[in-house]
Image (cartoon, helix red, strand yellow):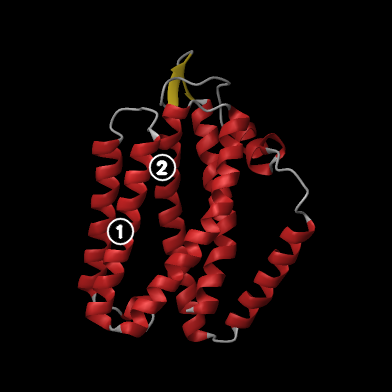
Amino acid sequence: MTPVEYPFWVWIFFFSVVLVALFVDIGIVNRTAHVPSRKETIIWSIIWVSLALSFNAFILWQFGLATAKLFLTGYLIELSLSVDNLFVFLLIFSFFKVPKKYQHRVLFWGIMGALVMRMIMIFAGAELVERFHWIIYVFGVFLVYTGLKMFGNSENNFEPHESAIVKLTTKYVRISKHYDGDKFFVIKDGVRTGTLLLLVLIVVEFTDLVFAVDSIPAIFGIT
C-alpha cells in the first residue's frame, strides 16, 4: 500500500496529530525563549517518543501487524540516522555561536521546513517506485555510494563558513553579522535585513535536505 492509497481520514488524523504536537511545542512549552534543563529535555524526549509509539499502536489496530512493522522500522531508521544530524547541528550552533535559548527556535522552524521537504520527496519517491520499481536499485546504489563517501571522508571537518549555501545566501540576501534576540529579520537603515539567526536557519534547512537525500532512499529500500 503506497502513501496515497491510505484512507483520507488517516492523513487528516496524522497531520492533525503533527500540528497539535508542533503547537504544544512552540506555542506552549517554548513560547518564551529559554534554555531547557536536562530534566525538561528528558521528559519531553520521552513524551515525543511515546507519541510516535502510540501512533504505531494506532496503525497496528487499524492496518495490522505488517503495516505497523513498516512504520516502526522507518521510525527507528530515521531516529538512528538523526544522530548524524544532531552532531552537525551542534557544530553549526557552535560555529555561529548561537545563544542556547534561541537554538530551539532555529530547530523548530528547521523541522517545519524539513517536514514539508520530506513530505514532497516521500510522495514523489513513492509514486516513482510505484511506476518504475527498478528505481529501488538506483536508490540502493546511491546509498552504497554515499556510505563509501562518508567512510572515506570520515576525517574531514565540516566548515559551515566554507559551504556553498552560506556563500550563496550571503551573496544574494542581506544578512547582518549579529543576532537580534530570536528575530530572523530586522529593519536596518530602512531595509529589511536577515539576522545571523536567519543564516543559521538556512544552513540547518539545507543540511537537513542533504541528510534527507540519504535517509529517504533508505526508507524506500527497507519498506
Q: Residue 220 bears which disc, if any?
A: none
**Residue 48 x/y as whole percent:** 33, 53
Residue 6, percent from left and from top: 29, 78
Q: Which of the 4 image quadrants contains residue 90? A: top right
- Residue neighbourhood size for the residue with mark 1, other residues' Cα within 10 Å, grouped as few (<14), some (14–19), many (≥20): few
Please tell me which residue lies in front, 41 or 101: 41
Q: Is residue 170 left or right of residue 184?
A: right
Q: Mark 2: which amino acid? A: Trp
Is residue 184 visible in the rendered structure shown here?
Answer: no
Find the residue positioned furthest to the front.
39
Q: Amino acid at mark 1?
A: Ser
Q: Is residue 124 visible?
A: yes
Residue where numbered disc 1 is placed: 50
In the image, residue 84 sits, relative to residue 128, either above or below, namely: above
Q: Check the image and report above or below for 30 versus 216.
A: above
Closest to the observer, 212 or 186: 212
Instruction: Residue 113 in the image: state x and y as whole percent.
Output: 43, 49
Query: Residue 134 is drawn in which quadrant?
Result: bottom right
Q: Quadrant of the N terminus?
A: bottom left
| In the rendered image, the vertical position of residue 190 relative to residue 20, given as above or below | above
- Numbered disc in front, either 1 or 2: 1
Residue 122 higher or lower than 174, as above or below: below
Q: Residue at x 41, y 55 (%)?
A: 115
Residue 169 position in % (x across, y down): 60, 36
Whole-Å distance between the Cαs marked 1 and 2?
A: 22 Å
Name the residue located 23 percent from the left edge and 51 percent from the top edge: 20
Query: In the image, 182: left or right of 199?
Result: left
Which mark, by number, is residue 109? 2
Q: Residue at x 52, y 46 (%)?
A: 205
- Disc 2 secondary structure class: helix
47 displayed left or right of 190: left
